Amino acid sequence: MPQHVVVVGAGVIGLSCALLLQEARYATTAGSRHPSLPPTSTAHRDHAHSLTTFAHMRRLHAAHPRTAGITFLKGIEYLERPGPEYLALSTPSPSGNPVARALPGFRLLDASEFPADGRVTWGCEYDTWCVNPMVYCAFLLRRFAHRGGRVVEREVRRPEEVFALGLGNGGKKNGPESSRGGEVVAVVNASGTGLVPDAEMTVTRGQTCLVAEECDATVTRQNADGSWTFCVPRGFEGGTVIGGTKELNNWDVEPSREVREELLRKFGETYPKILGEKGEMTVLRDIVGRRPTRNGGPRIEGEAVPGAGFVMHAYGLGGRGYELSWGVAEAVVEGVERHVKGGEAKL
Ligand SMILES: Cc1cc2nc3c(=O)[nH]c(=O)nc-3n(C[C@H](O)[C@H](O)[C@H](O)COP(=O)(O)OP(=O)(O)OC[C@H]3O[C@@H](n4cnc5c(N)ncnc54)[C@H](O)[C@@H]3O)c2cc1C
């Protein structure tokens, strides 16, 4: 009888964890309050997770170029006031800068390639990827189900509640064990905002605007006043997300028309190529999302909950859930394995 792991949450983190747990030969159930699909578009530990994710995305894209929802393209960064970590990238050392070396296709931009307004003082480009979240998460979910994963639509109040639901026995607490079942050895808490009392959890509101134009690069500009101007092309006929605000502790779900106009104006000035012959972008809709932000960084650690069982937390990914997803999923499998084999699971 296989050991069973239940993943709470079917966003990008829950689905990535569920797939890697399946590969590690655990019978896996993904439970979610909603049928799935994500809410929005698209330190050292984080850096490692982003490199791991890059490698996974490259493999997935190579194997499923038309169906995974992943696009490889150039990433362009413009900074009005670069900090020392960026300036260090401009100083060639004999061995080369390790950060630049880790970024495939890295190239410093010449000042002649900066936006025409004259305020950008540093820029670079590198090879990167982006996803169409609807296509990508549907792809992950299909893959999980096709490999025998079970998906349950259910709201839980706490991750540890899952131990009492009998999901390892086909959903019946005292029922016969199904062929997919077995003892629930761990619950993965990939609920985005955590589902447990955590004083460090909050949200960062993000207002963006979806336009019909397809952009040929993902562009990010850090402005001197601390604001951001960026675009994330979705690919797969999904248009481009133009952003965006980052408002800590703001829970407002209503978009502002003035903010939309400002975002479009600033991005058009930064990357006029997107305007094409028409000279303007075609607005499809405003988007307001909440990044599940945790002061001090995401919580990725195991917890033995008295009277219940082992919970592996993987929440609070803020504005980087996609970027770090496969690195987080690998850490989660490692934590579950350590618990099952009798060790610690603090990563
Ligand atoms: C404007 C904006 C721009 C962004 N840009 C980027 C970007 O460029 N790059 C990037 O990497 N990330 C970006 N993000 C962040 C990214 O969207 C999140 O980090 C990511 O979606 C978090 O994924 P998750 O799986 O942890 O949580 P979620 O996607 O929130 O999934 C949580 C899951 O848990 C389930 N759940 C929650 N509570 C319960 C419950 N009580 N019972 C059962 N199930 C439950 C939900 O139904 C859902 O399936 C952006 C976000 C916003 C808002």
Image: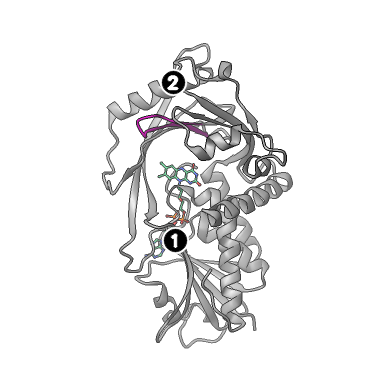
* Residue range highlighted in magenta: 220-234
The disc at residue 315 is: 1
Q: Quadrant of residue 25?
A: bottom right
Quadrant position of the N terminus in the picture = bottom right
Specify the label residue 280 is tagged with: none
Is disc 2 surrounded by few (<14), some (14 to 19) or many (20+) residues within 10 Å?
Answer: some
* Residue 169 x, y percent position in the rendering: 53, 81
Task: Kindly state the secondary structure of the residue where label 2 is placed.
Answer: loop
Q: Is residue 2 left or right of residue 265?
A: right
**Hey, what amino acid is under mark 1?**
Tyr
Q: Is residue 18 visible?
A: no
Q: Horizontally, is 194 left or right of 54 in the view? A: left
| Foreground disc of the pair 2, 1 | 2
Look at the picture and state if 94 lies above or below 149: above
Would you name the residue on which mark 2 appears? 119
Q: Is mark 1 within 8 Å of ligand 1?
A: yes
Q: Residue at x 53, y 49 (%)?
A: 322
> Marks 2 and 1, how far apart in space?
37 Å
Q: Looking at the rendering, which quadrant does residue 237 occupy? A: top right
Residue 228 pos. (x, y %): 41, 33
**Residue 50 visible in the displayed image:** yes
The residue sitting at 66% across, 52% down in the picture is: 56
- Could you tell me which secondary element the residue under label 1 belongs to? strand
Residue 285 in the image: state x and y as whole percent: 39, 32
Q: Amino acid at mark 2?
A: Arg
Q: Residue 55: percent from the left, percent from the top?
A: 67, 50
The structure residue drawn at horizontal position 41% and vertical position 67%, both measured from the top left corner, is: 154
